[in-house]
């Protein structure tokens, strides 16, 4: 006799997406569409009032004096380096364990990438590794606030400031994150943010923002993002065309009001994973991410380490069970094909290479439900139970 269909299926049979942007977006649909309609009717698609408003609110939430909109997080990094006059012959220190844009901004300007290893616990750049990567040609350091948690900025700034090295924060994954009370993007010379739809403050397409406390840098960034043009058709330098559309700004102004709530939901989900995974057995091969004290982690990603070479098999099991996951990032920058011929490695990147084989990011988006989280943890547990059974069978057969 077949069981009657129930309205709430058992946790183990539901599918869980890595991210579902529609859940959050549908809750503010009318408000966003009204904002877009307002821009449509105004006809001011570039540099409209919504852009100014977003820049002002953004400066406020990041605790900075100036915010300058641009077309993407990748452009923000490029513009930041341009405004610091980074060029051929200069060295820029970055973590190799990051998204590609951190690295390509450097090479696009003809400057030289120098990689520093990461801290195995936070996945962020290791200040000691920066120290040993510094040369007389080092002009900038780009700490990346990976997965929503700030890098150890006191140490980074101490290394940089005594040598007049610029610090550009890649805060693409860390909008709203704090470090000892200071906002991500407010500690270095320039902060770079992304509104790519999957980020914590995601737009309806590409978008980016730059933050700084330095009025001269703010003016230069604005100039460079608009063809270096001032006044109209007179070009003081060779800039690029990188603008944040009014329509994106209008939508982001609506979303920004909910940012704290989104962050709180992500924090709640992170805490719940800790609870559920600590309570379940057979998960000793999984190392949970930790939020350092005094850091306000905004959980752009919930990234665990899967040890003993089991990461890819676990990911396959999750995929077979319709549980979404992703590997951020499988190939460190120094191992990318496009950099192979130009990169000269001076420093050990042991932790970076190990992390690339162990990391696995699990669903953490704000609207993820408790049942979905239970499913994720149950599937992880069932994977380890199965592999434990297989191992004991092998042991029995061998004896
Ligand atoms: C997303 C991201 C970027 C690039 O942002 P885009 O808006 O997609 O260009 C840069 N750095 C990091 C660490 C990112 O996660």
Image: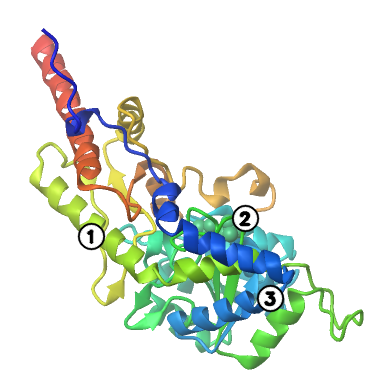
Location of residue 250 with respect to 350 vertically, above or below: below
Identify the mark nearer the N-term, 3 or 1: 3
Task: Identify the image quadrant of residue 377.
Answer: top left
Instruction: Compute the Cα span from label 2 to label 1.
Output: 43 Å
- For the point 58% across and 53% down, the residue is 100
| Residue labelled with disc 3 | 48
Q: How is the image coloured?
A: rainbow
Location of residue 351 with respect to 294 vertically, above or below: above
Task: Identify the image quadrant of residue 389.
Answer: top left
Tell me if residue 251 can be seen.
yes
Q: Toward the viewer: 317 or 89?
A: 317
Q: Toward the viewer: 381 or 124?
A: 381
Estimate the x, y position of residue 47 in percent, counting from the top left. Answer: 70, 75
Q: Toward the viewer: 287 or 350?
A: 287
* Element carrying mark 1: helix
Query: Within 10 angstroms of label 1, few (less than 14), some, or many (20 or more) residues?
Result: some
Estimate the x, y position of residue 219 in percent, counting from the top left. Answer: 70, 87
| Residue labelled with disc 1 | 268
**Which residue, as the protein is rendered here, is positioned at the far right?**
233
Q: Is residue 77 left or right of residue 389?
A: right
Instruction: Compute the Cα span from label 3 to label 1.
Output: 36 Å
Observer-side mark, 2 or 1, equals 1
Q: Which mark is residue 279?
A: none
Q: Is residue 195 left or right of residue 397?
A: right
Instruction: Compute the Cα span from label 3 to label 2.
Output: 45 Å
Observer-side mark, 3 or 1, equals 3
- For the point 19% across and 25% down, the residue is 387
Quadrant containing the C terminus in the rendered view: top left
| Residue labelled with disc 2 | 344
């Amino acid at each position: 006799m077949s069981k009657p269909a129930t309205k709430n299926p058992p946790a183990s049979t539901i599918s869980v997406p890595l991210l579902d942007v529609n859940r959050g977006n549908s809750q503010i649909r009318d408000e966003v569409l009204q904002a877009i309609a307002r821009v449509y009717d105004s006809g001011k698609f570039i540099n409209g009032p919504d852009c100014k408003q977003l820049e002002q609110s953004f400066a406020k939430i990041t605790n900075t004096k100036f915010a300058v909109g641009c077309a993407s997080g990748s452009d923000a990094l490029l513009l930041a380096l341009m405004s610091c006059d980074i060029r051929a012959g200069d060295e820029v220190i970055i973590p190799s364990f990051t998204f590609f844009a951190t690295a390509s901004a450097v090479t696009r300007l003809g400057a030289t990438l120098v990689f520093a290893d990461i801290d195995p616990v936070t996945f962020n750049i290791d200040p000691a590794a920066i120290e040993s990567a510094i040369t007389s040609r080092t002009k900038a350091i780009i700490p990346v606030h990976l997965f929503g948690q700030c890098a150890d900025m006191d140490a980074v700034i101490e290394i940089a400031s005594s040598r007049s090295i610029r610090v550009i924060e890649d805060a693409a994954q860390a909008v709203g994150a704090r470090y000892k009370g200071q906002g991500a993007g407010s500690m270095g010379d320039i902060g770079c943010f992304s509104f790519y739809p999957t980020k914590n403050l995601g737009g309806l397409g590409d978008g980016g923002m730059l933050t700084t406390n330095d009025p001269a840098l703010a003016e230069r960034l604005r100039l460079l993002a608009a063809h270096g043009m001032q006044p109209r058709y007179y070009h003081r330098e060779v800039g690029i065309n990188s603008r944040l559309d009014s329509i994106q700004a209008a939508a982001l102004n609506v979303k920004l009001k909910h940012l704290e709530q989104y962050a709180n939901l992500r924090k709640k989900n992170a805490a719940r994973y800790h609870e559920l995974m600590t309570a379940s057995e057979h998960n000793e091969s999984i190392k949970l991410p930790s939020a350092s004290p005094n850091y306000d982690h905004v959980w752009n990603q919930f990234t665990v380490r899967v040890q003993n070479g089991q990461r890819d098999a676990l990911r396959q099991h999750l995929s077979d069970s319709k549980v979404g996951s992703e590997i951020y990032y499988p190939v460190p920058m120094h191992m990318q094909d496009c950099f192979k011929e130009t990169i000269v490695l001076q420093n050990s990147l042991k932790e970076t290479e190990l992390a690339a084989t162990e990391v696995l990011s699990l669903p953490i988006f704000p609207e993820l439900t408790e049942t979905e989280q239970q499913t994720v943890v149950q599937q992880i547990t069932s994977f380890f139970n199965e592999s434990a059974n297989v191992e004991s069978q092998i042991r029995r057969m061998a004896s």
